[in-house]
Structure formats: C-alpha cells, structure tokens
Amino acid sequence: MKKVLLLGASGSIGTQSLDIIEAHPDRFTLTGFSLGKRVGMIPDFLKRFPSVQYLCVSNAIDAENLRKTYPDLKVFHGDEGLVSIIEECPSDMVINALVGFAGLVPSVASLEENKILCLANKESLVVGGSIINGLLTEGKGKLWPIDSEHVAIAKLLSCIDRHDLKRVLITASGGSFRKRSRAELVGVTKEDALAHPTWSMGAKITIDSATMMNKGFEIIEADVLFGIGVDHVTPLMHDESYVHSLIELQDGTLLADVSKPDMHGPIEYALMEGDVPFTPVKGKCLADYQPYHFHDFDPQRYPAVPLALASHRRGGNSNAILNAANEIAVYAFLEGKLPFLSIEEEVRYALDTVPFTEKPTLEDLLLTDKLTREAVSNHIGG
Ligand code: NAD
Ligand code: MG
C-alpha cells in the first residue's frame, strides 16, 4: 500500500490522478493534497478520501478558515506550505501536478525526502533538469514522468536494446491553430486558443500547445529523462493524438504506442511505477482508431520549438529564462494584454537580455526566474 500526497489536486492532471487513486484502494491511500484557490472543491475531495490528514492552499486566509472548519486536519499555505506538506505529510509517493515554475522547489524537496516523484510538472525538468538528475544520481528518490509522450517513450524503450535506437519521433497535434498560417494568427483570441482539437487540459499547457512551446519543452524533457540528445528527437505532426510517440531503430523499424488521448492511462502507468500489464483495451485495435494523419513539422510555422532547443543547447540558466518569459507572456495573452504572436517575441527578448549563468544552483534559478519575470513584465507593460 502506497501513501500518496497529491500537489495540484484541483487541476486537470490532479482530478484525473484522484480517479486513479480511487480506482485502486488496495494500492493507494491519499494522505494529503494541495490546491490553489479553488477551495470550494475541498469538501467533496475529503468526502471521497477520508484518509486525508494534510492540506495546503495558496492563501493564508483560506488556510485559517479551513483550520476552523476542519480542526483535525493540518493545514499549510503558500509556497513554503508546499515544502512543509512534503516534509510532514506521511507519504511514499508525491504526485506533482502543479503548473509552471511553482512546481520546481516541490519536485526538488520530494526527491530530497526520498519520495517516488510522479511528475506532471514538466517545467521542473525544463528549468531544473540537471539539479533533479543530480539528486537521482545520488540515489535520492525515484522519478516517473506523467506526460503521454514520455510514458510512451519509456514503454517503447523498455522493449528494445538501447544500442538499437536511432531516434525518437515525438508526436504533436499542432494545437488549436494548426489549420492556420502564421499570417492568420494576427488578432486571435483567448477563446480560440483554448479550444484544443484533441486534448482537454489546463489553460497554460493549452496555450503552450498552440505555440508548440509545449513540444519544445517535451523534447528537452526527453533529453533530461532518457538522455536522448535533442538532435535525436524529431517532432512529427499527428492530427488525431492516437499515436503518443514512436521510436525508430537502426534498421528502420518503427515502434509506436497507440491509444485514445486520455491522461488516465499515463497517470496510472506512473503511479503503478510501470507495473501495468500491456493488455489491449477491450474491443480496441488499430482499426478502431483510424484514420491516422501525419505531417512533417515546420519550424518556421512554430518558431517556439527551435527557440526552446537553442535555449537548451546554450545550457546554464537559459531554460529558467525561457520558462519564466513564456509563463509571463502566456498569462499576459490570457489576460488580453499581449497578442498571441508576441509570446515568442517576449521569450526571445528575455533570452537576449537576462544575464547568463553557466552553472546555476537552485538559488540561482530562483533569482533568474524573478529577474526574467520583472524584465518581461516591464517590457510588456511599457
Ligand atoms: P491546471 O491549471 O489544470 O492545474 C494546476 C494545479 O496547480 C491546480 O490545482 C492549481 O490550483 C495548482 N496551482 C497552480 N499554480 C499554483 C501555485 N502557484 N501554487 C500552488 N498551486 C498552484 O494544470 P494541468 O493541465 O493539470 O497541468 C499540470 C502540469 O501537468 C503542467 O506542468 C502541465 O504541463 C502538465 N501536463 C498536463 C497535461 C494535461 O493533460 N493537462 C498533460 C501532460 C502534462
Ligand atoms: Mg505531452
């Protein structure tokens, strides 16, 4: 029986993680969870999971009210609260389903506490990949990714001798504007951008899918997780999101992972630490998912991808600049303060102006994040 702490319980990955925990009462007990501001969801979660003893929310005032309503629960708040709940809540496993840079320190704290980290928060890996890999190499904790492409790649790599691998083909739907040229992106609205064709996800990752910054992040994520250099990961446009990724062997053979676009599968794979039988879903076979459409990736149509890869190749604190600039620009677009096409411009501006550090510590990354947020906010504001 694994005791589980879930960070980001109210979000898209968070709520689907609760479904998986609930479906396996013999394997998992939820001992604590965090969410941001949607405290109205807490009573239902506590009803479903009476084993919960620890909570964390964003605001101090919400935490104070919760302590009065639930005197038997230990309630934390804010960024420090996320670290305290990891340290104090009894758990074997932490699911990090937070969005953005806010997930980095909790990822590091979970590994330092020797937890099994099931990681949806890809920003942690993009910004702090070398720190996270350093902890894993020291034998601190374990890491299972929650991202459909990376679960697919992990499964496929487990079937081959690594020497036979030629490259990974990471699939991409192209997001909400995939049918439009760049010229047709002038003046697009938040509502248009949030209408993803194949996946239902949180707002930030849905915008990252429309710019394809998400795919840039995922190629970096593949490098950090599996040591596959970014030059050996090729994006492949795939309209239906049935093929979650492919690997190509030296002899040209292609292996693919195919299933419906539903994050419950990848979440279950991570929580079960890969111990999920490879049985086909009843009544589903290749024919049930057709048609399949694939297209070459065009870097000029999606410049966020080469931008992200250039940042990763430069190394140091570059990915912290990349990520912070992207976060500020995405939320400015969602608030109607920045045109869609300017998201990439803000990221480029930040990479050109924020000071470079070659071997950043966690503190250096926190400082880079802060400086970049200030620089990009001022640039957008002025
Ligand atoms: P979401 O916006 O739906 O949920 C985010 C959760 O984090 C919420 O519970 C929110 O309250 C909490 N949160 C946000 N900011 C916080 C802060 N500063 N402090 C404390 N809590 C905070 O996001 P999501 O779509 O579930 O994505 C979560 C992560 O998973 C992201 O990194 C995303 O890239 C990754 N991911 C998502 C999907 C998907 O299908 N949604 C797929 C693959 C990877
Ligand atoms: Mg993905």
Image (spheres, rainbow, N blue to C red):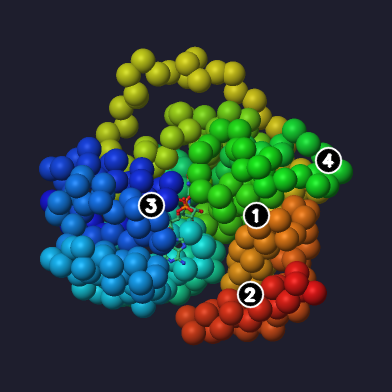
Q: Position of residue 50 (x, y in %)?
A: 15, 51
Q: Kindly identify the residue that appears in the image at 75 percent across and 79 percent down.
A: 353
Amino acid beneath label 1 = Leu
Q: Which mark is residue 184?
A: 4
Label 2 sits on residue: 373
Left or right, residue 277 beside residue 192:
left
Camera-side residue of 80 and 145: 80
Label 3 sits on residue: 10
Label 1 sits on residue: 334
Q: Secondary structure at mark 2?
A: helix
Dot 3 beta carbon under 8 Å from ligand 1: yes
Of callouts 1 and 2, the N-terminal one = 1
Q: Kindly identify the residue that appears in the image at 35 percent across and 57 percent down.
A: 39
Q: CA distance from mark 4 to mark 2?
A: 29 Å
Q: Position of residue 273 (x, y in %)?
A: 28, 49
Q: Residue furthest right?
A: 183
Amino acid beneath label 2 = Arg
Q: Secondary structure at mark 1?
A: helix
Assess disc 4: are there few (<14), some (14-19) or many (≥20) residues with their C-alpha within 10 Å of its C-alpha: few
